[in-house]
């Protein structure tokens, strides 16, 4: 996870200084170095990840796997909720101050000081928001590190996709895009889907994705419509994209024309003041989820018309990118 961030942070400056071929070689070299570092950590896993893997392995094919992620998630929320609430209150206060300073057209130095403090609090919120999704994200990183180290015969390597597939089939949300680094672990996701396909057989799947503004109630809407378990933890927002498999009732399968629905929930757009998201990253996210879904639900709830226009422009941009 940290490695992906390191690569992305070095991209803009290197592009200006080197040719594209040299730049690509440097990035590949850096990726290989990071994977080697990851591999050494994988073969010497810390106690937390060892405990998680042992718990997931011992719960395979049992009803316990239905409850283990929820219990762990609630326990982690209890550790972070109080601190996050304080940080969000501080963030709201600083955000209001920055907006006031902009309206007053205050001196640049004064505005920069408030913006720097706001950015520091935003980073602290991001660093303090620890959830089960961060632990499950590491499973994908472990898998990809082992794959690139040619350890396909490793018992752990072979069992990881099965663990995630069992969680997914049991109804747990699985991360599709890392919201902290805007990274999709394609090899990991493909391996998980292969295991899901092996277990369920050749089934018809309808993909429903959702796109909308931050705090517009996307996760709440999906939870209410389909009885899902998408994250609504206090003080934390959906980051990246998550997928959850929904089994269609037998009586409705022929009528609808599919056996399963894959629901993809995404982080809110227009959150640059909180997490410093660039406009092109939001465009990338919109293109990704619209291209992925058979149907995309766009939630246009917002504080004013300008926000609604912005999200519709982002969605339109995604269709243009797909030449549709």
Image (cartoon, grey):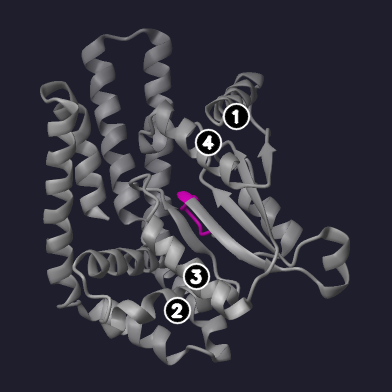
- Assign a secondary structure to mark 4: helix
Residue 251 image point, x, y percent: 88, 72
> What residue did someone put label 4 on?
287
C-alpha gap between disc 2 and disc 1: 34 Å
N-terminal of the pair, mark 2 or mark 4, is 2
C-alpha gap between disc 3 and disc 4: 24 Å
C-alpha gap between disc 3 and disc 1: 29 Å
Which of labels 3 and 1 is toward the front? 3
157 lies above or below 322: below
Confirm or deny contact between disc 2 and disc 1 (CB under 8 A). no
Q: Quadrant of residue 230?
A: bottom right
Q: Which mark is residue 25?
A: none
Q: Mark 3 Cα within 10 Å, few/some/many (few <14, many 20+)?
A: some
Residue 229 image point, x, y percent: 61, 65
94 lies above or below 26: above
- Assign a secondary structure to mark 1: helix
Q: Which mark is residue 319?
A: 1
Classify residue 78 as left or right of residue 213.
left
Residue at x 21%, y 43% (from the top left corner): 7
Residue 43 makes an appearance in the image: yes
Residue at x 44%, y 61% (from the top left corner): 189
> What residue did someone put label 3 on?
194
N-terminal of the pair, mark 2 or mark 3, is 2
Viewer-proximal residue among 63 and 104: 63
Q: Mark 4 Cα within 10 Å, few/some/many (few <14, many 20+)?
A: many
Residue at x 51%, y 59% (from the top left corner): 233
Confirm or deny contact between disc 3 and disc 1 (CB under 8 A). no
Part of the protein shown in magenta: 233-240
Q: Which mark is residue 162?
A: 2
């Amino acid at each position: 996870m940290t490695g992906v961030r390191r690569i992305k942070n070095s991209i803009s400056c290197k592009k200006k200084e080197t040719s594209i071929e040299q730049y690509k070689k440097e990035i590949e070299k850096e990726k290989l170095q990071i994977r080697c570092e990851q591999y050494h950590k994988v073969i010497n896993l810390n106690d937390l990840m060892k405990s998680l893997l042992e718990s997931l392995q011992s719960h395979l094919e049992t009803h316990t796997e239905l409850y283990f992620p929820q219990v762990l998630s609630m326990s982690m929320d209890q550790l972070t909720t109080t601190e996050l609430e304080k940080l969000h209150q501080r963030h709201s206060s600083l955000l209001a101050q920055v907006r006031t300073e902009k309206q007053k057209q205050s001196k640049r130095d004064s505005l920069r000081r408030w913006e720097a403090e706001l950015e520091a609090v935003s980073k602290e919120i991001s660093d303090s928001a620890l959830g089960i999704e961060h632990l499950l994200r590491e499973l994908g990183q472990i898998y990809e590190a082992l794959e690139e180290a040619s350890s396909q015969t490793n018992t752990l390597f072979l069992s990881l996709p099965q663990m995630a597939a069992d969680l997914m089939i049991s109804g747990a949300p699985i991360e599709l895009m890392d919201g902290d680094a805007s990274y999709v672990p394609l090899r990991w996701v493909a391996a998980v889907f292969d295991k899901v396909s092996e277990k369920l057989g050749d089934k018809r799947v309808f993909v429903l994705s959702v796109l909308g503004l931050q705090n517009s109630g996307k996760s709440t809407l999906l939870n209410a419509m389909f009885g899902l378990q998408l994250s609504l933890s206090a003080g934390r927002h959906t980051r990246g994209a998550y997928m959850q498999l929904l089994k269609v009732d037998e009586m409705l399968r022929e009528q609808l024309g599919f056996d399963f629905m894959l629901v993809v929930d995404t982080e809110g757009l227009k959150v640059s003041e909180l997490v410093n998201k660039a406009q092109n990253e939001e465009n990338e996210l919109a293109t990704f989820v619209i291209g992925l879904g058979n149907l995309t639900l766009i939630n246009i709830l917002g504080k004013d018309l300008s926000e609604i226009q912005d999200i519709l422009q982002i969605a339109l941009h995604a269709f243009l990118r797909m030449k549709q």
